Image: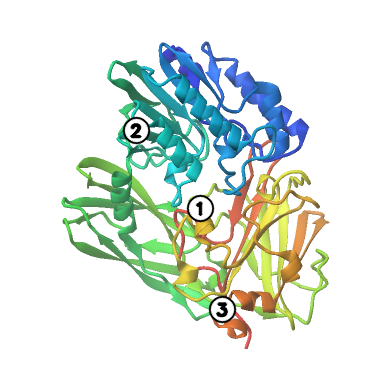
Amino acid sequence: MPKVNLLSPAFVVSVGDLIEGYTENQAQLNREWDEIESFVSELEAPFFYTAGNHDMNNAVMAEEWQRRFGPSYYHFLYKDVLFVVVNSELFGMVNQPDTPVPGPWQQADQMAFIKSVLAQHPDPRWTIVLLHQPLWSYSSVNEDWLEVEALLGERDYTVFAGHFHQYSRVTRNDRNFITLATTGGGSGLRGTAFGEFDHVAWVTMRDDGPRIANVLLDGIYDEDVSNPELLSGLTEVANAIEMEALTSTEHLFSNASQKVTISNPTESILTVVPSIARQTNFNIEGLMPLSVPAGESVELFLRLSTDEPVPYHSLTTASVEWIVTGIIGERPAQFPVLKPILPLSKYAIGTIDGVEVDGDLSEWGPLTYNAARQGDVLSPELEPNDVSFQFDVREGPEHLYIAVNVIDDDVSAHADLIPRAQDSITFSIDPRVPPERDASMSAGQALFSGDIDAQVSTIVSTGAHAKDELLSFVDDTNANTQISFASTDTGYAAELAVPLSYIASKAPNGDDWQEARISVGVYDLDSDAHAADVLYWQPFRYGDAPLAGSQVFVRPN
């Protein structure tokens, strides 16, 4: 806010997601809205609110918005420029695209309002539309949004949105549709070319339309700072660094050679300078700078070793940062590519006669797998004295059991919050075969493509009656899945029992499935933190640096 004041704008508009939200707890809502309103009060210019999915995803939150701010869709005129603020959550909520957010407003009324406002102001100097979700960016564009575009017709207009935390400018109907990046929200912050940066968009209205300067801490960029074509080129180069999968059938690791292939899909030379970004408990040798001619590939062989043989499951993830410099899409670019390194084996599922699913792990004995440090190279490092966990996977006569013992110095459980907003455990069991279970995609792609739904997948909180959230897919009624938590002297423990028949229903070969990719992660919310961090045993399969072949467990003979 102080930086915006330095720019002395006439007024400030938002594109939503101002609070964490996703709660029906009135006291929590009051705390979050009071906090953001205290920030807004620092502005020396008027501030116009736009509703996002974090601001309004249930009736309680919608009513709180109405109490504080009045309408969730509205318009105003400034120097003959028409501003139309739209509530994208009425078109469809993020977690239920076909369902408008419940509460005081109806989508039909909003559509009538938009039609009326545009009819009342048929020829303003310009029209600016503000909303949270870039509804034009989905594979299937909402019919109501297509009607809004038709209503806008041939007038001069520009559309601003947010939601994706990644800047992009696209042209539709010969008009600019701009998705803003972040002003402090979650972002990989890989730089302007990726559209990942914290910024404000400074808009100056001129006779020929708005001129947009994206103001960052380190400079000013125009509206074409990133676009789908440039991002596609960068992604192609980043994906051209291929790390050979190191998968063994042995129990102990002592040494291996890992081949790295670096291809250059551009029309100019690429230079690549690697360095170890995260140390580990095995040695890495052979890193060196490389020059890759246009259209060619080079190979690099890394030597991995330990001083003495150790179990594969005790190895911790290392990472190498590859600084790539070249001309991408006719623009000079330099950016980091982070890749995990971890020799893998297939881990044996043990056997157990049966488990009373009560959170008491006494019948398990020592748990085999230990996550005392962050296994995902792009997630925040977490101190072992803050949170760590051990887990094990065993098969009984009718169920697959997972036990998790979490060491946590500050357990946070809330019955009225979604699991990811508090201490919780995420499980996934994927009995499919490669390439399906090794597919590299973002969490959003996995969600909307149905990849997550093809697994046994859930996030379960320590809160006894935690609010359901979108990413929980285990149907407890149909699957007869059992989950239980129990407090311990050092944190909490959990047991999960999934019927083998339910897993078989997800496997292409039914009851004869032999392997599964089994992921376990622990969300940790400390009392002095605003959001939970998540600790993974091995790289997150839907992150930006996944590891094909990781976390594969083999059934007992």
Type of the residue with mark 2: Asn
Q: Name the element at disc 1.
A: helix
Q: Residues within 10 Å of mark 2 (few under 14, many from 20)?
A: some
Q: Quadrant of residue 395?
A: bottom right
Mark sitting earlier along the chain (2/1): 2
Q: In this picture, is 45 found above or below 173?
A: above
Residue occupied by mark 1:
444
Type of the residue with mark 3: Glu
The Cα–Cα distance between marks 2 and 1, rounded to whole angstroms, is 25 Å
Q: Is residue 219 left or right of residue 160?
A: left
Q: Residues within 10 Å of mark 1 (few under 14, many from 20)?
A: few
| Circles 3, 1 touching at the beta carbon (< 8 Å) | no
Q: Which mark is residue 515?
A: 3
Q: Name the element at disc 3.
A: strand
Type of the residue with mark 1: Gly
Q: Residue at x 68, y 79 (%)?
A: 501
